[in-house]
């Protein structure tokens, strides 16, 4: 469930207020790379656009709301179907698998590869 809470490709878009300072600093860095004659014009355009975005009545992006809706639907489906999410490989692929099947596969893997069981938890050291 922890992975599911992170959303599509392990993140959910955050509200604009949480990253507005980064957006402003990145804009200023990009504008500094332009020719000196063009910088003032682009600063004015960027300022107008940022003010429009920040003053909009919607504090959250629409995509943000859609992502949360999809995450809630997935959580409900996972609970009703007794399934869990697994990362399939080193990429960003996620697999939905039945919980019982997953436990059986893990126990079979441990039995075939002869993993020993430890009497105590070594992580406490």
Image: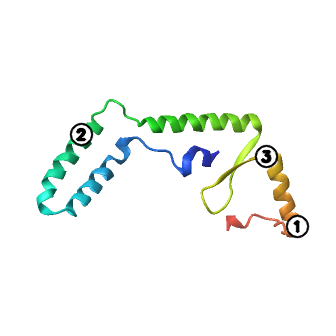
Mark 2–mark 1 Cα distance, whole angstroms, equals: 62 Å
Q: Which residue is mark 3?
A: 99
Cβ atoms at labels 2 and 1 below 8 Å apart: no
Cβ atoms at labels 1 and 3 below 8 Å apart: no
Mark 3–mark 2 Cα distance, whole angstroms, equals: 49 Å
Tell which tag, 3 or 2, sits nearer the viewer.
Answer: 2
Relative to 38, residue 50 above or below: above
Category of crowding for the residue at label 2, using alpha-carbon neighbours closer than 10 angstroms: few (below 14), some (14–19), many (at least 20): few
Q: Measured from the top left, where is residue 114 in percent x and y?
A: 87, 70
Q: Measured from the top left, where is residue 80 in percent x and y?
A: 74, 34
Category of crowding for the residue at label 1, using alpha-carbon neighbours closer than 10 angstroms: few (below 14), some (14–19), many (at least 20): few
Dot label at residue 51: 2
Whichever of labels 1 and 3 marks the residue nearer the N terminus, that label is: 3
Category of crowding for the residue at label 3, using alpha-carbon neighbours closer than 10 angstroms: few (below 14), some (14–19), many (at least 20): some
Relative to 13, residue 34 above or below: below
Q: Which residue is mark 1?
A: 112
Q: Secondary structure at mark 1?
A: helix
Tell which tag, 2 or 1, sits nearer the viewer.
Answer: 2
């Amino acid at each position: 469930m922890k992975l599911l809470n992170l959303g599509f490709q392990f993140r959910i878009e955050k509200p604009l207020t949480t990253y507005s300072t980064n957006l402003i600093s990145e804009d200023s860095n990009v504008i500094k790379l332009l020719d000196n004659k063009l910088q003032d014009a682009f600063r004015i355009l960027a300022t107008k656009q940022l003010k429009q975005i920040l003053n909009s009545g919607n504090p959250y992006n629409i995509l943000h709301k859609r992502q949360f809706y999809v995450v809630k639907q997935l959580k409900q489906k996972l609970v009703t179907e007794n399934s869990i999410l697994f990362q399939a490989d080193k990429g960003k692929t996620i697999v939905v698998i039945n919980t019982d099947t997953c436990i059986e596969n893990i126990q079979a893997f441990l039995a075939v590869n002869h993993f020993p069981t430890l009497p105590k938890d070594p992580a406490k050291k």
